[in-house]
Image: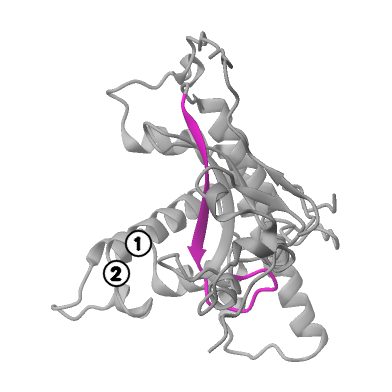
């Protein structure tokens, strides 16, 4: 059976693709013929071909070359002094350095505005039912948002199949802490109307979360400076819902999700900056390059 060859043009088409979805399928049962890319058998171990079939660019070792490694002189890396944090700081004190009062106030205001807008629309179209929970809504405060976020974090630690089970009074399933913080109806109402911005930006796919994302990335940089060794890591956050830029990467554990590129410190894994991938040619601000 004749061997099926893959040209360098095909390789470049795959590398320029928006995601990794087709890479494994493209090369699953094929071989790359070195003769097609202008390299003899003796050169395979020494050179790495890049470019077209007609004109390949080859990487060659440089003799008698010397490289200079610049000395890392920044002494201000680590937790910044302006944070007033130290080894004795409590987790909640560290949390508040990122989720500041300004951010939580923004979330509370936008959530209240969105709830009022939804209620007005339902009234206008005569779709607001007499027994709807919207009638019992009271504006959320900063404390409500902090309680809501704390319960969301705790749900990631205590895993249950449904939200309702966190407020179950059954002895085998009971977790009384949730009921002490907030009623189930209140939690569900905040979850329904949770909003971050009322500004519409048509050419920014992340405009719904842009204020939160920008605030957090700015705090990542403000509170901590990474050391000498950093790396850019491709991350995939699990997501199987409907989304125009959802990625499928077969080699990742999640496989389906939202791809981001994170600048991390090698020693601690601290994320110093992050960029969410929303499509080819779109930068971290959501604008076309």
Residue 112 visible in the displayed image: no
Tell me how far mark 1 sits from mark 2, CA to CA.
6 Å
Viewed as shown, does residue 279 lie left or right of 129?
Answer: right
Left or right placement of residue 35 versus residue 88 in this view: right
Query: Does residue 1 lie above or below 260 as drawn?
Result: below
Residue drawn at 60 percent across, 43 percent down: 103
Q: Does the residue at mark 1 contact the one at mark 2 (Cβ under 8 Å)?
A: yes
Q: Which mark is residue 159?
A: 2
Between residue 235 and residue 47, name the one nearer to us.
47
Residue 87 image offset from top left, x and y in percent = 29, 22
Q: Position of residue 181 (x, y in %)?
A: 35, 59
Of residue 286 and residue 7, the one placed in the foreground of this image is 7
The magenta stretch is 229-247
Q: Is residue 152 magenta?
A: no
For this view, does 154 lie left or right of residue 74?
left
Residue at image position (45%, 55%) is: 149
Which residue, given by chain and number where applicable, does mark 1 sit on? 156
Q: Is residue 108 visible?
A: yes
Which type of secondary structure does the marked residue at label 2 adopt?
A: loop
Between residue 207 and residue 103, name the one nearer to us: 207
Across and down, in percent, residue 213 comes to: 63, 48
What residue is at 31 percent from the left and 32 percent from the top? 90
Residue neighbourhood size for the residue with mark 2, other residues' Cα within 10 Å, grouped as few (<14), some (14–19), many (≥20): few
């Amino acid at each position: 059976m004749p061997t099926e060859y893959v040209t360098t043009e095909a390789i470049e088409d795959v590398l320029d693709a928006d995601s990794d979805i087709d890479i494994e399928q493209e090369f699953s049962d094929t071989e790359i013929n070195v003769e097609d890319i202008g390299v003899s058998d003796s050169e395979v171990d020494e050179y790495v071909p890049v470019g077209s079939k007609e004109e390949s660019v080859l990487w060659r070792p440089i003799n008698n070359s010397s490289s200079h490694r610049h000395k890392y002189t920044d002494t201000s890396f680590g937790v910044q002094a302006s944070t007033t944090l130290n080894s004795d700081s409590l987790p909640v004190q560290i949390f508040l350095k990122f989720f500041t009062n300004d951010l939580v106030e923004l979330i509370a205001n936008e959530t209240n505005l969105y709830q009022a807008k939804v209620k007005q629309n339902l009234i206008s179209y005569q779709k607001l039912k007499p027994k709807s929970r919207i009638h019992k809504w009271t504006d959320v405060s900063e404390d409500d948002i902090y309680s809501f976020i704390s319960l969301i974090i705790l749900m990631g630690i205590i895993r249950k199949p449904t939200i309702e089970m966190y407020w179950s009074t059954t002895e085998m399933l009971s977790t009384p802490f949730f009921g002490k913080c907030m009623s189930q109806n209140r939690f569900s109402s905040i979850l329904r109307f949770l909003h971050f911005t009322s500004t519409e930006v048509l050419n920014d796919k992340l405009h719904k979360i842009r204020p939160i994302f920008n605030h957090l990335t700015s705090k990542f940089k403000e509170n901590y400076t990474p050391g000498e060794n950093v790396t850019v890591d491709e991350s995939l956050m699990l997501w199987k819902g409907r989304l125009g830029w959802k990625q499928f990467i077969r080699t990742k554990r999640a496989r389906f999700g939202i791809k981001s590129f994170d600048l991390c410190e090698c020693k601690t894994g601290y994320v110093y900056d992050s960029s969410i991938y929303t499509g080819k040619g779109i930068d971290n601000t959501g604008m076309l390059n």
